[in-house]
Image: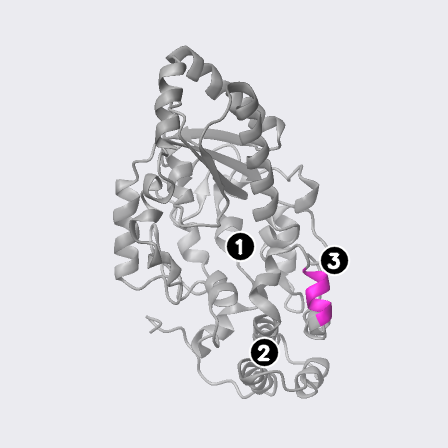
Amino acid sequence: MAALNKNLTTAMNTPDLTALAANIKQWGEQLGFNQVGITGTDLHAAEQHLENWLEQGFHGDMTYMQRHGKKRSRPECLQPGTVRIISVRMDYLPETAATIQATLNNPSAAFISRYALGRDYHKLLRSRLQKLAEKIQAAIGDFGYRAFVDSAPVLEKALAEKAGLGWIGKHSNVINRKAGSWFFLGELFTDLPLPIDQPATNHCGGCTACLAICPTQAIIAPYQVDARRCISYLTIELDGPIPEPLRPLIGNRIYGCDDCQLVCPWNRFARLTAEADFHPRHRLDSQDLLAVFAWTEAEFLAKTEGSAIRRIGYQRWLRNIAVALGNAPSGPEIIAALRGKDPVCDLVDEQVQWALAQQLGKRPNLSPPSLVA
């Protein structure tokens, strides 16, 4: 890619590159991206923040966060020849905040983070980024590029902030002044020396709503998230049992958590997605806990086909639902379902027994710990 970059630099002058950057943004919008920005490769500040986060062990079992060394914070090491990153945003909010909150407030409902209700965003965004690259190629000829959508060691939030798509909020999500935070990110690493956009400025101000609302107090300080306490980590990334002191705090959330986004005042500007593929499939936005607990593995695989949910597997799916059932108001139907559940594996069986004990009123004093080991 480096040699190609040198040839393109000499072949295209500044006005040409400026016009190309404008065209790239226009093509991106035509492909369904809600915003396109361009930035360089310097992520020094983000690299230091990441190293401090890893040193404190906040990544938990996500060992992949440190596996690739500097490649995550130095794009040119991950993809040699990279000099610019085209960062894109695609809004995914499928329903109103009031509807989301109503589901979250219903203890018998299976709450799934709204980003996972529709088609797996990884495939959709990567396909659109490939089409964007093809449009660029049609205009200027061959050039070096590589598309990423949460699929490699990339600091996508830091890149989005530098590209002007929004700022990283106190909850660690990217916030846009005109669109809130309900959006996906993707990147096109390229050797094109395009003009870069101004970074976004921070507008969180003195607001700490996201810190206050977090069910497990995972946002331990502004801009610092201890993943070991985060419900998204516990229900998606964690491979083993959910720590017992944290189980009651999970409520009915069986895949991810949206609380910090729901409470963010900037999300009053968020608009419902125009992308049909992000609309709920298989009624995943309104399923009952008992209904999804009764799914066989074949049903789970069928109803999560093409969804980001499938990657947690059937056992973690049942683990999460068992915890949610333990948190639900006690009732004979739930008790019967828990008692009648055939053995699955040690992971699921232990959480089912915990849930049954909760339902039968054997509730120990489970106040949240100050630190998860």
| Three-letter residue code for mark 3 | His
Q: Position of residue 228 (x, y in %)?
A: 39, 66
Residue at 69 percent of width and 67 percent of height: 300
Instruction: Point out residue 27 in the picture as x, y percentages from the top left corner.
Output: 57, 24
Q: Quadrant of residue 316?
A: bottom right
Q: Circle 1: is it few (<14), some (14-19), or many (20+) Cα within 10 Å?
A: many
Q: Which residue is mark 2?
A: 326
Left or right: where does residue 307 sit relative to residue 86? right
In percent of width and height, residue 85 lies at: 41, 33
Q: Is residue 254 above or below residue 162?
A: below
Residue under numbered circle 3? 282
- For the C terminus, the quadrant is bottom left
Number of other residues with Cα within 10 Å of mark 3, as a class: few under 14, some 14 to 19, many 20 or more: few
Q: Which residue is mark 1?
A: 258
Identity of the residue drawn at 41% across and 43% down = 157
Say if the magenta span includes residue 300: yes
Q: CA distance from mark 1 to mark 3?
A: 20 Å
Q: Is residue 360 visible?
A: yes
Instruction: Name the disc covering residue 2, or none.
Output: none
Q: CA distance from mark 2 to mark 3?
A: 24 Å
Q: Is residue 5 above or below residue 157?
A: above
Task: Reply yes or no: does residue 17 show up in magenta.
Answer: no
Q: Which residues are magenta?
A: 298-304
Q: Amino acid at mark 1?
A: Asp
| Dominant SS type (magenta) | helix
